[in-house]
Structure formats: C-alpha cells, structure tokens
C-alpha cells in the first residue's frame, strides 16, 4: 500500500535537547527531511513555553535534561491547560534501553522513541508514522 508523500512544509516541529550540538544536528536532519517550521528549546521548561507559543504538530524531545527532564516535560504537557493540544505527538530521543524509563514514558503517553544520535532514516520513519495519523 503506497502512502502519499508527506508535505513536511505544512507541519511545525519542536526540538527539545539540552546539548547544542545534538540539537543543531537534529534540526539539520529535520530541515533535510523537509520541515520549514522548526522551533527549539534547551530543556523541558523552555520546551513547555515554546509549546504554548508555537503549537507544534510534533515534538522531538531528549529524556535526560536538567532542570526539567523529558519525562517531566511530557507529564506537564499531557496535563497542561495552557497548550492548545495536550495530545501533540512526542518522540523521545534516548540512549535508554532501561525498561523502567520506557515504561514511565509509555504510561505518560509518549508516541515513540529514536535512539541517539538519530539517523536521518530513523527520525524520518518515526515522524512519518506520527504525521500519517494527522
């Protein structure tokens, strides 16, 4: 079954990652995929402010960040009265294969995982799957 190609230009995406080099790399990949509207934040706290400000269609978020982690960000997003879409799909970037963290993320309603550092193919495949439902 052929899916029609995704017009990434019509979607906005938010990258929340505390390491500037990794964040720039992910933003570069997303730009190569075809996204034109890419917002960025350096932790879960600034990420929440960006969510309220920009209303992204998809969020790519690191798990290990301080002062506000990806798990804390996701819990806050799903419970927030301020964001326009609490169900915005979230993809976690992780080096974690620890089942506890994966279980917590699933319980909070994460939509997928991509191993760090993400490859073009892995990131595109995950984002395609989320946008297919939009």
Image (tube, helix red, strand yellow):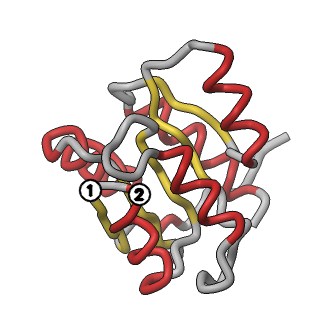
Residue tagged 2: 44
Tell me if mark 2 has few (under 14), some (14-19) or many (20+) residues whose alpha carbon lies within 10 angstroms of its own.
Answer: many
Query: Which of the 4 image quadrants contains residue 53?
Result: bottom left
The numbered disc on residue 115 is none
Judged from this view, the residue extending furthest toward the left is 21
Quadrant in which the N terminus appears = top right
Which residue is situated farthest in the right direction here? 1
Q: Where is residue 64 drawn, in percent x and y? A: 39, 35
The answer to whether 129 appears left or right of 11 in the picture is right
Tell me what residue is drawn at x 73 percent, y 47 percent: 108
Q: Residue at x 33, y 26 (%)?
A: 117
Which residue lies at the image location 53% right of the left edge and 40% below the top edge?
92
Residue at image mark 1: 42
Q: Residues within 10 Å of mark 1 (few under 14, many from 20)?
A: some
Q: Which quarter of the rendered picture does the C terminus lie within?
A: bottom right
| SS type, badge 1 | loop
Do the residues bearing badges 1 and 2 touch, measured as CB atoms within 8 Å?
A: no
């Amino acid at each position: 079954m052929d899916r029609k190609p995704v017009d990434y230009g019509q979607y906005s995406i938010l990258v929340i990652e505390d390491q500037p080099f990794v964040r720039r790399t992910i933003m570069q990949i997303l730009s190569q995929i075809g996204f034109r509207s890419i917002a960025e934040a350096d932790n879960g706290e600034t990420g929440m402010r960006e969510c309220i400000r920009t209303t992204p269609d998809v969020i790519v978020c690191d798990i290990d960040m301080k002062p506000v982690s990806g798990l804390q960000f996701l819990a806050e997003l799903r419970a927030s009265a301020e964001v326009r879409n609490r169900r915005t799909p979230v993809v976690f970037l992780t080096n974690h294969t620890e089942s506890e963290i994966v279980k917590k993320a699933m319980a909070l309603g994460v939509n997928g995982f991509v191993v760090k550092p993400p490859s073009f193919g892995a990131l595109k495949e995950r984002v395609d799957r989320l946008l297919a439902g939009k």
